[in-house]
Image (cartoon, rainbow, N blue to C red):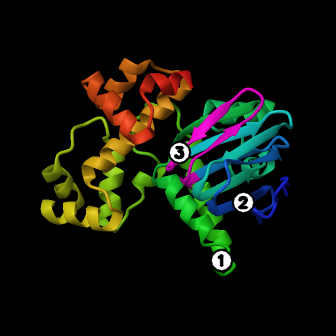
């Protein structure tokens, strides 16, 4: 298990061979609290549901605002620091060893950084907005300490689902339906969100979406709002900016190309949406 200078603050759990995770929750009142963890060649998935903080290594640094995630580590064993600012926090750190990923997914990953890590043990450094897969994984991990032993199996299944979505993407800009969007889902809300993800570069057409899902437009709109706390338009904005963050971080396109690719015809509208979702401008995201 990884160790820290203040182990009582991070609660570590064994999940499977080559797979462990820590949860950190509660309030901090000090000026800033820092922990240091050795990566030992593993990749860390940081899921930041609440609170503000930083994660940094020898070369890379990520600002983690609420609703953001980061992938760090890999390569030669090195220390990564985690700094949390005063306030309420809810953070999960999943530690994935190469042997676990190879045993579950093999060597055929399409994500370039993760494939390089598996084959050459290269470092991994990436961050983005938490989407439905990260949120579902966070919820599954959060239920382990208070749930029965089957919760571990459910959590590992969610990790595999997350890996199938995130690590098998051929390019950051692909708009084709992914693995889980092809699974037949009975819940109309989940079907609607899956359709939005697959067609995020298109304008929201509530009537057409409701027809695709099979319920009345006004009922779909109300049901999405009641079950998720967000409107369909807000979900679409989040999905677009989530994809934009991935594309800008991968270096496959500039700001203008990214805006057009995720469905924005106006750079000013794209910049406004980006700032509202991430707290920074697209240019600041690139330079960071």
User: What secondary structure is found at the residue carrying circle 2?
Assistant: strand
**Nearer to the camera, 17 or 282:** 282
Kindly report which numbered mark, 1 or 3, lies closer to the viewer in this rendering.
3
Stretch of the chain drawn in magenta: 48-68
Q: Is residue 82 left or right of residue 168?
A: right
Q: Nearer the viewer, residue 173 or 68?
A: 68
The x and y percentages for residue 246 are: 50, 33
141 on left or right of 79: left
Nearer to me, 102 or 236: 236
Residue at mark 2 = 22
Q: Nearer the viewer, mark 2 or mark 3?
A: 3
- Residue lying furthest bottom: 148
Label 1 Cα crowd, 10 Å radius (few <14 / some 14-19 / many 20+): few
Q: Is residue 75 left or right of residue 251?
A: right
Q: CA distance from mark 2 to mark 3?
A: 18 Å
Q: Is residue 53 magenta?
A: yes
Let me know if residue 175 appears in the view: no
- Which mark's residue is nearer the viewer, 1 or 2? 2
Question: Within the magenta stretch, is there residue 6?
Answer: no
Q: Residue at x 41, y 53 (%)?
A: 182
- State the residue position of label 1: 150
| Percent x, y of residue 58 | 78, 29
Q: Is 113 located above or below residue 228 in the figure?
A: above
Write down the residue under mark 3.
65
Pick whichever of labels 2 and 3 is earlier in the sequence: 2
Mark 2 vs 3: CB contact within 8 A: no
Residue 167 picture quarter: top right
Quadrant for the N terminus in the image: bottom right
Q: Label 3 near label 1: C-beta < 8 Å?
A: no
């Amino acid at each position: 298990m990884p160790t820290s200078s203040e182990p009582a603050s991070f609660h570590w759990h064994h999940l499977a061979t080559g797979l462990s995770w820590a949860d950190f929750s509660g309030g901090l009142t000090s000026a800033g609290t820092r922990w240091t963890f050795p990566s030992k060649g593993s990749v860390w998935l940081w899921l930041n549901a609440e609170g503000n903080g930083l994660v940094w290594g020898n070369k890379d640094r990520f600002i983690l605002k609420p609703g953001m995630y980061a992938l760090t580590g890999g390569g030669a064993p090195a220390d990564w620091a985690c700094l949390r600012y005063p306030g309420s926090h809810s953070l999960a750190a999943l530690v994935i060893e190469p042997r676990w990923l190879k045993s579950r997914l093999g060597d055929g990953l399409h994500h370039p950084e993760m494939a390089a890590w598996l084959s050459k043990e290269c470092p991994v450094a990436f961050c983005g907005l938490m989407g439905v897969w990260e949120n579902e994984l966070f919820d599954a991990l959060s239920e382990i300490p208070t749930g029965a032993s089957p919760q571990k199996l459910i959590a590992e299944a969610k990790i595999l689902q997350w890996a199938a979505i995130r690590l098998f993407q051929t390019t950051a800009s692909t708009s084709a339906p992914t693995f889980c969007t092809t699974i037949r889902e009975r819940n109309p809300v989940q079907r609607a969100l899956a359709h939005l993800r697959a067609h995020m570069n298109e304008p929201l057409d509530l009537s057409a979406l409701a027809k695709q899902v099979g319920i009345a437009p006004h009922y779909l709109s109300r049901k999405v709002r009641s079950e998720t706390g967000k409107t369909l338009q807000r979900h679409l904005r989040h999905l677009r900016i989530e994809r934009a963050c991935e594309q800008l971080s991968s270096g496959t396109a500039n700001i203008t190309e990214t805006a057009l690719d995720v469905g924005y015809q106006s750079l000013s509208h794209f910049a406004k949406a980006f700032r509202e979702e991430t707290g920074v401008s697209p240019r600041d995201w690139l330079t960071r």
